[in-house]
Amino acid sequence: MKHKLIGPFTQVVSLANLPMKGAIEDEALEIIENAGIVIDENGKIVEIGDFASLLIHQYSEIEGIEGDAVLLPGFVDCHTHICWGGNRARDYAMRVAGKPYLEIAKAGGGIQDSMRKTREASEEDLIGVTQQRADRHFSRGVTTIEVKSGYALDIDNELKMLRAIKNADTFTKADLVSTCLAAHMKPKDFEGTSKEYLDRALENLLPKIKEEGLSNRVDIFTEETAFNQEESLYYLQKAKELGFEITVHADQFSTGGSKVAVEVGALSAEHLEASGDEEVKLLAASDTVATVLPGASLGLGMQYPPCRKLLDAGACLAIASDWNPGSAPMGDMLTQGALLGAMEKLSTAEVFAGMTFRSAKALGLTDRGRLQKGMLADMQMYPCADYREILYNQGMLLPSKVWKKGE
Ligand code: NIG
Ligand code: FE
């Protein structure tokens, strides 16, 4: 067995002992000082402990760390749309000047605009931009990235997007997890009802996705302007029967989506800016992860989701970037998590948990997000002596080293 020892780290913040649901106080954080971490040849963690004590044993390699260093699990971004063509700077300028997002969408801008440019892009173009964005994310400590289709909205181009995501995964160091979001919106050129559009996806797209092994996840945008609750329930139940895991764009502008998500047993309900006390209660009592997307609030100039209430009620709160050309162009998870914490009064432990193991749960992944024996050595190191400096710098202190499976 080949074992590598990495260290010494001033602090290792393992998150190993933190609960999957509910509020967490910073006192619950387990901080291991002057620590080393041992990785096996499969990129899994074998041991974490006092560096000097670990140093007594034999290793095939020792990776030395110099200076102050705080080690965290790599971030898991469980909600992005980083495969797209073109950009929406024009929309953004209109929005900051006061024109509402849904109005721009109705006038043929918004998602329909990205759709045109994504349909025009070749698969190679999409592989290139997706890899570029994934690499940027990786350099900022994001080691697992969910990526949705949903900017093509016809069978062939949705498949093109999913193939591009699969290919980009082989080029970037981060792990990409793809999701079919053909139910993002009914495209303007589809002549038929929403139900007919969804039926076409169920009959002609989802079986092909399974056949080619392009994704095992299905998402929908539940909103009166996209797909209503009844249509969403119908589509998701059928997708589930076909063997897909479910996630929902829920409660972004109006409520209803989180109810759909809980009813179909979705892994996660995502957005939640419009969620009220009823939705908070519902999500807290369920196994569905409540994923919040501060980047969308920042991009649209909207209120944040009720994060404090969700945590206090006992929900599993994940934090993701929603990186996309329209509502969330920034794509910087760390800055967004830090700002969300400040605005919603979250502990550092709650922000870290939301961006690591709780976000992994939203993807159904149990092998990452905490630094402990048996977990993947997906890790990031910050050049500081105290873990609190990370959020304190509000995105301006970046990781100096990032490992995927110990490399
Ligand atoms: O998560 N709300 C729907 N979908 C995306 C935005 C898509 C876009 O505007 O391009 C979101 O915010
Ligand atoms: Fe989204």
Image (cartoon, rainbow, N blue to C red):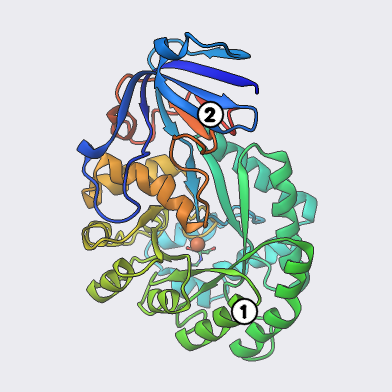
Where residue 82 appears, as percent x and y from the top left, is 59, 52
Residue 154 in sight in this render: no
* Residue type (three-letter) at the residue carrying disc 2: Val
In percent of the image, x 47 and y 34: which residue is there?
373
Q: Position of residue 35 (x, y in %)?
A: 39, 19
The reply to whether discs 2 and 1 touch (Cβ–Cβ < 8 Å) is no
**Nearer to us in this view, 52 or 339:** 52
Q: Secondary structure at mark 1?
A: helix
Q: Earlier in the sequence, mark 2 or mark 1?
A: 1
Is the residue 164 above or below the residue 103 in the image?
above
Residue at 51% over, 82% down: 232
Q: Where residue 12 sits in the image (x, y, percent)?
A: 38, 26
* Badge number at residue 402: 2
Quarter of the image where the N terminus is located: top right
Q: Which is more toward the observer, 220 or 365?
A: 365
CA–CA distance in space, label 2 to label 1 = 39 Å
Asked if one can make out residue 163 in the rendered structure from this viewpoint, the answer is yes
Q: Is residue 255 above or below residue 401?
A: below
Give the answer, above or below, for where 60 lies relative to 366. Answer: above
Image position of 391 (left or right of 200): left
Q: Which mark is residue 241?
A: 1
Residue 191 in the image, given as x and y percentages of width and height: 69, 89
Q: Secondary structure at mark 2?
A: strand
Residue at left offset 51%, top offset 29%: 46
Which quarter of the figure has residue 163? bottom right
Q: Is residue 324 left or right of residue 10?
A: right
